[in-house]
Image: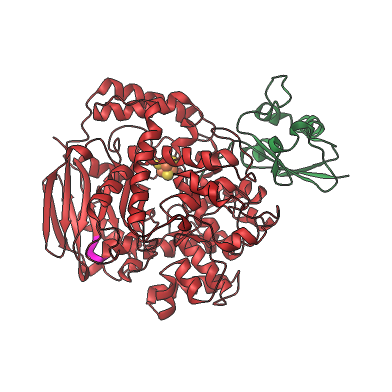
Amino acid sequence: MEIKVKFFASFRDKAGVPVTRTSARNVQELFNEVLEDYEGLRGHILTDSSSDFPLKKGVTVMVNGRNIRFLDGFSTELDDGDVVAIFPPVGGG
Amino acid sequence: MSRQILRVNVSENQIDYEEVHEEYAALGGRGLTSQIVYDEVEPTCNPLGPHNKLVFAPGIVTGTVAPTSGRISVGAKSPLTGGIKEANAGTDFAQRLAKLGIKAIIVEGGPVKSGYKALKLDNNGAELVDAEKWSGRGLYDVYEEIEEEIGEEVGIAGVGIAAELSGSNSGIAFNDMEGMPSRYAGRGGLGAVMATRGLKFVFVDDEGAPGVEIEDRETFDRGRKKLADALTSHDVTKPGGALNSYGTGVLVNIINEAGGFPNRNFSRGSDDRASKVSGEMKAEEIEERKGQRPHRCSPGCVIGCSETWTKEDGEDPMGVIEYESVWALGPNCEIYDLDTIGELNRQCNDMGMDTIEAGNTIAVAMEGGVAEFGDEEAALGMMDEIREGTPLGRILVNGTEFTGNAFGVTRIPTVKGQAMPAYDPRAIKGIGTTYATTPMGADHTAGYAIATEIMGVGGDLDPLSPEKAELSRNLQYSTAVIDTTGHCLFTAFAVLDIPEGLEGMVEEVNGVLGADLTVDDIPDIGESIIDLEKEFNKKAGFTKEDDRLPEFMREEELPPHNDVFDVPDEVLDKVLS
Ligand code: SF4
């Protein structure tokens, strides 16, 4: 099982790579793994809160183009071939 | 010195300064252009005929030290939509005009097809001077010549070849901080309204100008500080934040990942090649080429989303390539090369065209068989056709709908005749709700639902859910107010999230006007502006059936989410009712 994880904008610089891969089975597991490998990202992505959605304001996490807020949050399950995209706060128009 | 309205009639060689009547005193920017157009323009008139009028108005706080407030609104009856139009741009022209004490310029009369004039304004008055020598030429050279002739410290507004051809895709080009014609009130064909009144340029020299009067300095200063604090602390608008680091192009990747980035004339919502034209990629290239980033369109902007793009060798700076322009002239035509996109953008600036309309026009021409999608040379060739005024060029310069109809295309992405910006409404339905219902024709800036649907600013709503009437309405009302204050719309990212920032914006306005508005007044003020615009359109012949997206977007599924635009007509009818 392989999940592709893509970092964008300032997260790409902080991770030092644009893409990594994991075999996590859900988003929570993905963060556990990925943030261990890219420790510099942790404080920019997660809050210290103990809520079940400890994502920092403005950070967007998509699984196959769908924001996890509108899926199952951190419990969103992952399948082989899924693509997870992680964005810092962005804006424009 | 109280502020004045300048009325100019080129065909009569007449210039008059008028006192501002009371009902205009508390207005500026879009609120003022729309009010004057409503009051003075016959809604059923031919937009290029003698009864239309073009109105320039800086925002209420423009010309003061209020942060990120160098905006000018331009209004008229639009030759592209046939309805009322307001387009705005960030430029020091706006600040110079406001400092001269001019609340609005109304350009009327005509039509004049030759013998173009320039309106020259300074602290001693205004005069019309000959501008014929600059007719038929590219604006980059002309703006340089104008600076050499009349000085660098002058704001310039002008129209190019597209407007001289009376094209419905002709904008008004304002100077950027380097004097290049890269800041556009682009949408809706306002350039042709200016050119058909015989006016080619407006030059504004504010040396010795009295500046903008501030009735209540303490309130103004308090507000200015609150807004500046909000802008410099919000992750999107702060120094080193997303807009400052990557410009508006930072949206390419997120909208592409969300499946709402239209490729090949709105056929697909994402494409792996989009990353080649992303903001991240562009910022890297700019650094390598020693272009400029960040950069500001006008003095006093604390966000600084702009940039200076150059050719590969670092030569020939051309100004900013915005997200919308990258998309329209790029992936929407299946072009994924920043240098080609840069050249297409340069051509648009040089001839005075809106990039969103131009990119959509090329895409529908490609769909109609004029060229293959992805053919970069053919896209550049279409620009040459316009410059030469060939029969094909005369079709293209009239925009997307005109071109699509000319070539028998049924997939034409327009609302009220105006081409859609860079978000597919089938994947992001709030922005589609705005496209459908704003009096402006398809316009993302009229109610930027993307902020909430994609970026989580001002709330979180699922982009695929069709329940967006309230979101679109609230955003359209607040946007009308921001466009009236003279603040850049990008301040909204901060003020939608930080209540003190919004309070600050209102206090700045109170300080300038000596008023006592509150944040709670914003929806009513916005509603009154939009009601007026809707009323104009109604008198011009628009009905609720004009508040609809094109048929193909209701029937053809958009990959990757394979959804259609399914917001019911009854919901659309409720948005601004
Ligand atoms: S944020 Fe960008 S567009 Fe807005 S005023 Fe600043 S530089 Fe201009």
In percent of the image, x 41 and y 70: which residue is there? B397
Q: Is residue B428 left or right of residue A65?
A: left
For residue B446, say whether it is visible: yes
Judged left or right of residue B452, residue B504 is left
Q: From the viewer's perspective, is B237 left or right of B539?
A: right
Q: Is residue B253 above or below residue A24?
A: below
The chain whose colour is red is: B
* Furthest residue toward front: B570
Q: Is residue B495 above or below residue B338?
A: above
Q: Residue at x 31, y 64 (%)?
A: B192
Q: Nearer the viewer, residue B231 or B363?
A: B363
| Colour green maps to chain | A
Quadrant location of ligand 1?
top left
> Does the magenta segment cover residue B80?
no
Given residues B425 and B310, the one toward you in this image is B425
Q: Is residue B51 above or below residue B97?
A: below
Q: Residue furthest right?
A: A1
Residue B529 location, x and y as percent? Answer: 34, 42
